Amino acid sequence: GAVVSQHPSRVICKSGTSVKIECRSLDFQATTMFWYRQFPKQSLMLMATSNEGSKATYEQGVEKDKFLINHASLTLSTLTVTSAHPEDSSFYICSARGSSGAVETQYFGPGTRLLVL
Amino acid sequence: QKEVEQNSGPLSVPEGAIASLNCTYSDRGSQSFFWYRQYSGKSPELIMSIYSNGDKEDGRFTAQLNKASQYVSLLIRDSQPSDSATYLCAVLQGGSEKLVFGKGTKLTVNP
């Protein structure tokens, strides 16, 4: 199956700093990537949809200036949490949708656990 | 508001039994349906996808879809303790590339 990687897997940072998370599709080209957030014992919440070469589309209630998304190539999307605060501590998961074959299937990365102190 | 509903459980079955997980959805325009398995602390892993009415089998897993009833289910035969996880039902919104997830059903398979 399709492989999606994320880096880092875990990060601890101080309040006010920025954190960048990378999401890569390793064996296929992803025209679209998605960023989710999951709080403990809750389901996945879509934050934004990222299309290669264009601006991300954010879900209602997600601050685009706080969660910066860049999808510079067909295999890489990045999420930057700017001026992170403790309430941003969560499990951030990306997924990638293939451009052929897996047309309507999303494959998830392993996730990044963020803890803001 | 497009919704996907699942019984949160927990669902507990003995090893070797059949586990039945159910999901209903509100968007009649949905055409693609997925079951993901999520172990505690891990990201979701795709188990099954189904697009047509009826059954689709893959090893011990069978997905069932009934679009008229807006209902999709997952059967796990010969359940194993390693199947213990939260199972997420996901529906691709009609005319969209977004997946809408249910809140998940926690399954425990007892040895």
Image (cartoon, rainbow, N blue to C red):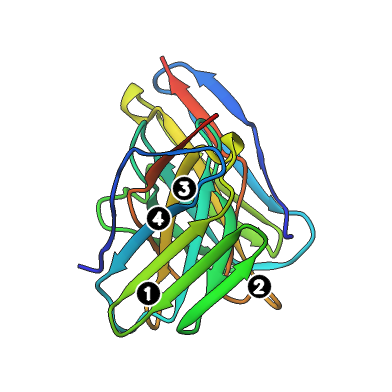
* Residue that appears at 24% across and 72% down: B26
Indicate which disc, 2 or 3, sits on the residue closer to the N terminus: 3
The answer to whether the residues at label 3 and label 4 have Cβ atoms under 8 Å apart is: no
* Residue that appears at 59% across and 49% down: B78
Q: How much space separates mark 4 and mark 1, taking CA atoms? A: 21 Å
Q: Is residue A104 left or right of residue A56?
A: right
Task: Report in which chain the residue with disc 4 lies.
Answer: B
Q: How much space separates mark 2 and mark 1, taking CA atoms? A: 16 Å
Crowd tier of the residue under label 2, counting other residues whose Cα lies within 10 Å: few below 14, some 14–19, many 20 or above: some
Task: Report in which chain the residue with disc 1 lies.
Answer: B
Residues flagged by tags 2 and 3 on a common chain = yes
Q: How much space separates mark 4 and mark 2, taking CA atoms? A: 24 Å
* Spot occupied by residue A104 in the image (x, y as percentages of width and height): 56, 74
Q: Secondary structure at mark 1?
A: loop
Q: Secondary structure at mark 3?
A: strand
Residues flagged by tags 4 and 2 on a common chain = no
Q: How much space separates mark 1 and mark 3, taking CA atoms? A: 25 Å
Q: Secondary structure at mark 2?
A: loop
Q: How much space separates mark 2 and mark 3, taking CA atoms? A: 27 Å
- Mark 4 vs mark 2: give the one in front: 4
Mark 1, residue position: B93
Task: Report in which chain the residue with disc 2 lies.
Answer: A
Which amino acid type is shown beneath numbered disc 2?
Answer: Ala
Mark 3, residue position: A68
Mark 4, residue position: B21
- Mark 2 vs mark 3: give the one in front: 2
Mark 2, residue position: A102
Indicate which disc, 4 or 1, sits on the residue closer to the N terminus: 4
* Residue that appears at 79% across and 60% down: A27
Query: Is A91 in front, or is B83?
Result: B83
